[in-house]
Amino acid sequence: MRSRLLSAGVGVAAFAALTSFGMANAGTRADTTVTIQVQGRDFSGTVDSPRPLKCAKNRKVILYKQVGTVQDPTVDKKIASDLASLSGNRYRWDTGNTGIRGKFYARAPGTTECRADSSPTVHTTS
């Protein structure tokens, strides 16, 4: 009887340890870094992460036209989007020529495994 209780106690403790380990890892999302370059009205950049296969490969990047003095994806206008793909040793995105002037930034929305990030704001020059 005593050995059954001991076995059950060990099983419950092991389950609790595994459950709490899984829950702790589930809340840890990987950092993401989004860059942007503008040449005329062509926009491109990169997506980087310590977990590139989960957080950079095929990551959706949205190009926003900033309407206010600060970035705000809830009010800024979505202009274009692209999926980051491997080019050389970097995951790159490219929207091509938007034909629009103004202030712009790129944003990779957060996912269950990856944090969101926005690039700095850039201005078109022509």
Image: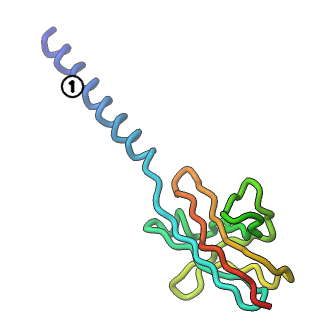
Graded by Cα atoms within 10 Å as few (under 14), some (14 to 19) or many (20 or more), the crowding at tag 1 reads few
- Identified by mark 1, the residue type is Val
On the image, which quarter does residue 61 sit in?
bottom right
Extreme residue in the top direction: 1
Extreme residue in the front direction: 69
Judge by depth and name the residue closer to the eye, 11 or 81: 81
- From the image, which quarter does the N terminus lie in? top left
Looking at the picture, does residue 85 appear above or below residue 17? below
Residue at figure coordinates x 63%, y 79% from the top left: 36
Looking at the picture, does residue 81 appear above or below residue 6? below
Pinpoint residue 66: horizontal percent, then vertical percent: 74, 67
Looking at the picture, does residue 23 appear above or below residue 44? above
Question: Does 83 sit left or right of 25 as displayed?
Answer: right
Residue at figure coordinates x 69%, y 65% from the top left: 69
Pinpoint residue 123: horizontal percent, then vertical percent: 71, 81
Quick one: SS at disc 1?
Answer: helix
Looking at the picture, does residue 32 appear above or below residue 93? above
On the image, which quarter does residue 63 sit in?
bottom right
Residue that mark 1 sits on: 10
Pinpoint residue 55: horizontal percent, then vertical percent: 54, 64
Rendered image coloring scheme: rainbow
Residue at figure coordinates x 32%, y 30% from the top left: 15
